[in-house]
Amino acid sequence: MARRKQIEFQGLQGHNKNVERAVVVFCVACIVFVIIAVQAVGGGTFR
């Protein structure tokens, strides 16, 4: 069996940290929005 060299993706490892922070903030904002929407529609009680 011949061994093949593993493919390395160098471009994906060097992404900008600001992009990572923006994605995290966006996710947290979506979670907060969903919680507020559920509270508004469900009468303010979690079940």
Image: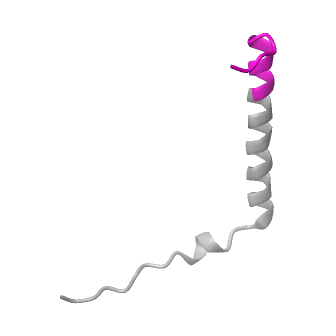
Q: Nearer the viewer, residue 46 or 3?
A: 46
Q: Nearer the viewer, residue 4 or 27?
A: 27
> Residue 22: x percent and y percent?
79, 52
Q: Considering only vertical position in the picture, is 43 above or below 17?
A: above
Give the position of the C terminus as an image quadrant.
Answer: top right
> Residue 20: x percent and y percent?
74, 59
Where does the magenta region start and end?
35-47
Instruction: Name the residue: 74% across, 21% down.
Output: 46
Q: Nearer the viewer, residue 41 or 10?
A: 41
Tell me if residue 45 is in the magenta stretch: yes
Instruction: Name the residue: 74% across, 28% down.
Output: 34
Tell me if residue 18 is in the magenta stretch: no
Give the position of the N terminus as an image quadrant.
Answer: bottom left
Residue closest to the far front:
47
> Residue 10: x percent and y percent?
57, 78
Instruction: Name the residue: 79% across, 57% down.
Output: 21
Q: Considering only vertical position in the picture, is 15 above or below 47?
A: below
